[in-house]
Structures are given as C-alpha cells and as structure tokens.
C-alpha cells in the first residue's frame, strides 16, 4: 500500500445442492470481469494430497459440490462449523501479526505486498499446526489455538488451489480450467474470494478484509486484514495489519496499528470511512459463508 500511514508509535518487532454427482467426482484431479493471475512460487508443505484423492472420500455425497451462494465455491470447501471458523480467524490474524512483531522466514520471503500477507496467513491458518509446521514457521510462541478440524491444507477438496480466479458459480469444469489457483492479488481477492459486509469498520470481525481502490496508482487495489483484539497488544479491539507494498522503489514493510488511528490518516484517501469513495468497505472470505 503506497503512501501508507507513517505513524508508528509501537516498537518494530444451507446449501442447495447442484446435482453434479459422478461428473464432478470423476473430473476432480460482488463478481466482474475475468482475470489471468500470475503463478505463485510453489509452497513447501508436508502431506501433499491431490484433490482427486480427497474427492474420492466425498464421492457418495454429491451435494457437497453444490454452490448455493453462486460465488464459485462448492459447499465442501466452506468452514461450516462455528468452531472451525473461529480457529481459522484466530490463526489467520495471529500469523499476520507475527509477520510484524517477529519477522522470520518463511513469512519474510513470501510476504512482499498486501495480498501476499493475506495469502500467507490464509493458507497457513488452514494447515495442520504440527511440531514440524511450527519448526518451519519459526513463530515467537505457541498461541494454543485449536486447528480448523475440517481440513489440513493442502488436504482439502481443491488441493493446493485456494483462490478463485474468475466469476460465476461453481461447475465441474472449474476443476480443470484454472478457475482456482494458489495465487491471488488484491483485486482477485476482492472480486472472487470475498463478499461485502459493510462500509462501516465497526461491522468487521477478526479475519475480515478492508479494501481500498486508488485508481491513480500502478497497483490500485489494496487490502488490509482486520485483527480486532491483538494477540500481541493488551489494549484495543480494532487492530489491523497490512503490508505497504513497494514504497517508490524501496522495499515495503508490514505495519500494525489501530483502525481508529488509520481514520486520522493525513491523506483522506486512506481513511476507512463510508464518506471516502476510495474505501470499498469490509469484506468477508467466501470460505466463511
């Protein structure tokens, strides 16, 4: 996020089924215009499992491949248990904050812009947080959260492909035509992987995303992760975390502050207020519908 807030007072550190049935099982191996996103660097992870192997386990339940919301994600990809949604949000916000307070590989190697921070936290929040995973992640401490029990990424219905890349409801052909990918930039996250909640930040829940559109910039879409109560700070319930992206030729950085402070940004374009047309609002991940 360019021209990002400079003040840093803290030290650095339902569903209705679609009758896809055997057609889908055999093929498993707000939306606008189509995108052709780039490819992400392969992510090292233990326990690689193909989507076809996972689908075999659900072949007797074709209703799990229905898309009652019409947002492009089948029912079997959603975290439909409240406990799983809570665990996912805790891990996602903790991992993003840790990238600020305790920057270490692999986060520092992967997180180079605002969308990369979200991808890193999203993917690892879905992983099985085993001792081996902790050794690789190099986190400052064990937060003691339970895991989202439905999946242990990459063991989920779409394999390593977490993000939708094009509009339209889910269909069996999406499993073969690159409708899902490991990579998603901020625009792709906004258009195909989230749904609007409100233009009032007070409606945000932990794990929600705040989007901005600055059409005069080279990379006009920017995303901020809403944390809520911090895992690292004792006070406040409106913490946010984001990566600045490239700063006019200088490498960007992760920043962490309270939303109330961002509302006082010296440049009104970056204030998360309903009166600011550059602020698109609060969005929630389709995974959490």
Image (tube, rainbow, N blue to C red):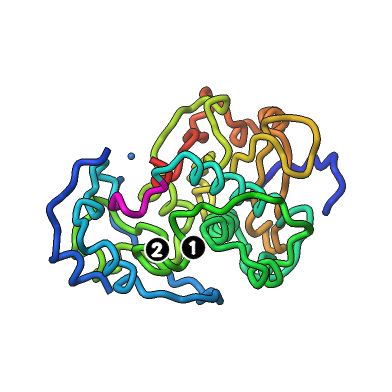
* Magenta span contains residue 77: yes
Q: Nearer the viewer, residue 242 or 75?
A: 75
Residue 165 horizontal/vertical position (percent): 34, 59
Residue 286 appears in the picture as rendered: yes
Residue plotted at (69% across, 51% down): 144
* Magenta span contains residue 149: no
Q: Nearer the viewer, residue 263 or 87?
A: 87
The C terminus lies in quadrant = top left
The residue carrying mark 2 is 156
Residue plotted at (46% across, 76% down): 48
Quadrant of residue 266 within the rendered picture:
top right
Which residue is outermost to the right? 11
Badge 1 vs badge 2, beta-carbon distance below 8 Å: yes
The image shows a total of numbered marks equal to 2
Residue plotted at (45% across, 65% down): 183
Residue 46 horizontal/vertical position (percent): 54, 76
The residue carrying mark 1 is 152
- Give, as a single range, the part of the protein colored magenta: 74-79
Element carrying mark 2: loop
Quadrant of residue 57 within the rendered picture:
bottom left
On the rendered structure, is 40 left or right of 289? right
Element carrying mark 1: loop
Residue plotted at (71% across, 34% down): 258
Q: CA distance from mark 1 to mark 2?
A: 7 Å
170 relative to 134, above or below: above
Q: Nearer the viewer, residue 251 or 167?
A: 167
Residue 212 appears in the picture as rendered: no
């Amino acid at each position: 996020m360019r021209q990002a807030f400079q003040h840093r007072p803290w030290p650095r550190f339902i569903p209705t089924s679609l009758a896809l049935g055997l057609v889908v099982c055999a093929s498993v191996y707000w939306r606008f215009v189509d995108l052709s996103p780039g490819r992400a660097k392969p992510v090292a992870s233990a326990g690689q499992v193909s989507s076809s192997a996972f689908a075999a386990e659900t072949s007797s339940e074709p209703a799990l491949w229905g898309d009652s919301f019409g947002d492009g994600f089948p029912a079997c990809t959603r975290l439909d248990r409240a406990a799983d949604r809570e665990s996912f949000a805790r891990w996602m916000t903790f991992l993003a904050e840790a990238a600020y307070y305790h920057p270490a590989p692999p986060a520092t190697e992967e997180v180079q812009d605002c969308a990369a921070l979200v991808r890193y936290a999203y993917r690892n929040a879905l992983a099985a947080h085993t001792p081996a995973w902790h050794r690789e992640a190099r986190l400052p401490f064990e937060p003691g959260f339970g895991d989202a029990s439905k999946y242990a990424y990459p063991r989920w219905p779409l394999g390593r492909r977490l993000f939708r890349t094009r509009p339209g409801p889910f269909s069996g052909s999406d499993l073969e035509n690159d409708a899902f990918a490991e990579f998603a930039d901020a625009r792709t996250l906004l258009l195909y992987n989230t749904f609007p909640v409100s233009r009032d930040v007070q409606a945000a829940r932990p794990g929600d995303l705040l989007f901005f559109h600055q059409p005069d910039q080279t990379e006009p879409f920017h995303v901020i992760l809403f944390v809520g109560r911090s895992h690292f700070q004792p006070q406040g319930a409106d913490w946010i975390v984001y990566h600045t992206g490239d700063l006019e030729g200088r490498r960007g950085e992760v920043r962490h502050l309270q939303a109330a402070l961002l509302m006082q940004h010296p440049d009104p374009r970056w204030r998360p207020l309903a009166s600011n047309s550059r602020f698109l609002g609060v969005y929630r991940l389709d995974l959490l519908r």
